[in-house]
Amino acid sequence: MDIKIKENLKKIFGFNQFRGNQEAIVDNILQGNNTFVIMPTGAGKSLCYQLPAVTKEGTAIVISPLIALMKNQVDQLNAFGINAHFLNSTLSKTETNKVKKEVLSGATKLLYVAPESLTKEENVEFLKSAQLSFVAIDEAHCISEWGHDFRPEYRKIKSIIAQIGDALPIIALTATATPKVQQDIQRNLNMEEADLFKSSFNRTNLFYEVRPKAKSDTKKHLIKYVKSQKGKSGIIYCLSRKKVEEIAELLKVNGINAAPYHAGLESAMRIKNQDDFLNEEVDVVVATIAFGMGIDKPDVRYVIHYDVPKSLEGYYQETGRAGRDGLEGHCLMFYKYEDIVKLEKFNKDKPVNERENAKVLLQEMAAYAESSVCRRRVLLHYFGESLNEDCGFCDNCKKKRDAFDAKEDILTAIEAVKETHQRFSLDHIVNVIRGEQNEYMESYNHDGLSVFGKGKEENERYWRSVIRQTMIHGLLEKDIENYGVIKLSKTSEDFLKNPHEITFTKDHDFDEMIENDEAE
Ligand code: ADP
Ligand code: ZN
């Protein structure tokens, strides 16, 4: 590595060392290679493009969807003595012209651009005439409908880059990438060949827990919990603004120092509540997911999901705001299946494919909540990582679970996938195993298979859970080309030839737990 780079790291940014993959990433960009960075929030993505930008000739374009944060980012860079500007709809004509002049003079090292500004004809023309070093695409998951934050304008980025400079290196960065999203990003940006730098998503200091959400006493439970955390910072996420107001009020009347945060509040109030939280004048923020983007409070000790999130990506992001300082953080979710059904209803007016995507994401969320497998294993599996052991630091690891030897069940699951030629999703495979007669069975002749009905003694929920756990153990896998289709993995055939004992656990039955709870 160039000595100058290390020098700049210290001199300009004030850091003594690189973190994780940063050095390799910076190096790769300086060599002019397309680069794909997947790093959890807070790990230090910005430096990966900021440092090469100040080192290279010309201006780096940074595409970012967060208009509200652009000014902050640019101010921060300016404070480091770096010449940076932004271009978005908040600028006046005069301000825009001034920025453009700076860029054309060659002084600007980083230019932050909102995707909708990028697509404007006049800006494309302007960028064509500027001397550019590379293009960084921040929050690159916005390109994918499978992410939690799809932005249609992101789809146009590649064609715009092709117009302003076909040979410009591209660096895409994101904190959320399931294998499916990752593939979408690479395809859409035409950067399948890019060098990939993926950091682990394992946040070892976070304790994950799910508790049943009973009608009668969840609020009491919440108050008790928050009181037990007195003086510590926490975030409570709710689905609606109304719920945010209600819970914040409830906590306040119970003597807890809480404040609400959602997009419906006046901006002065929002800023005040956020600042009060950062300055520790408020212990708890009750918020919709509008809260947290770009907020870097290191000592958040707990994140509570009062309502179930819409996707595991969202859940991971939101819980990721706990324990940024590396000390323990508690991630607690209150769950009942009714909340999933409620969220599904919200999607009913969406176009068919969006609705279907949203539904798959929600079902993954429900499966996580109901699973009694180590939470960390499930989460990391979702992000395409595998943990070979239980973590010992989640509710499922701490609690005694209903365990059973799943050898025979795994064999049945693999057989069902194999005999149906690896072309069907979970629902159908489960129906085959349970011997559910329907029109598909008849038309594919699956009712004639030897595996048909082999597992009819157990219910649907049991088999879903078995197949999911089989996937977590890598003995079956989901085809990411064809979301939902379950295929054999490299180890499936091996297992068929040499089956061995594997312990699975029975899913939690939250409905039953909630009923018992309410009966007490
Ligand atoms: P991300 O975009 O991945 O969420 P940021 O780029 O905002 O993360 O960085 C998170 C924090 O880590 C920031 O406060 C940043 O200043 C700090 N940081 C980044 N790189 C380093 C480093 N090499 N040494 C020390 N601190 C760093
Ligand atoms: Zn665990």
Image (tube, rainbow, N blue to C red):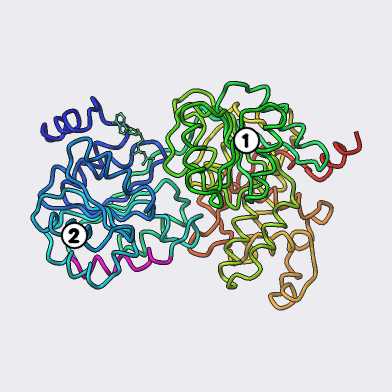
Residue drawn at x 48%, y 56% as measured from the top left: 149
Task: Assign a secondary structure to mark 2.
Answer: loop
Looking at the rendered structure, the kind of residue marked 1 is: Cys
The residue that disc 1 covers is 374
Q: Which mark is residue 168?
A: 2
Ligand 1: image quarter: top left
**Crowding near pointer 1: few (<14 within 10 Å), some, many (20+)?**
many
Residue found at the very far left of the displayed protein:
105
Residue 516: % across, % down: 87, 38
Q: Which residues are magenta?
A: 152-165
Residue 386: % across, % down: 50, 40
- Compare marks 2 and 1 and give the one earlier in the sequence: 2
Residue drawn at x 58%, y 73% as measured from the top left: 351
> Does residue 301 sit above or below 181 in this rendering?
above
- Can you tell me whether the CB of the residue at mark 1 lies under 8 Å from the nearest atom of ligand 2? yes
Residue drawn at x 71%, y 78% as measured from the top left: 443
Answer whether residue 493 is visible to the viewer in this image: no
Q: Main secondary structure of the magenta part?
A: helix
Residue found at the very far bottom of the displayed protein:
443
**Crowding near pointer 2: few (<14 within 10 Å), some, many (20+)?**
some
Residue 92: % across, % down: 27, 60
Q: Is residue 153 magenta?
A: yes
Foreground mark, 2 or 1, reads: 2
> Does residue 252 sit above or below 182 in this rendering?
above
Quarter where residue 425 is shown: bottom right
Residue situated in front as seen by the camera: 191 or 296: 296
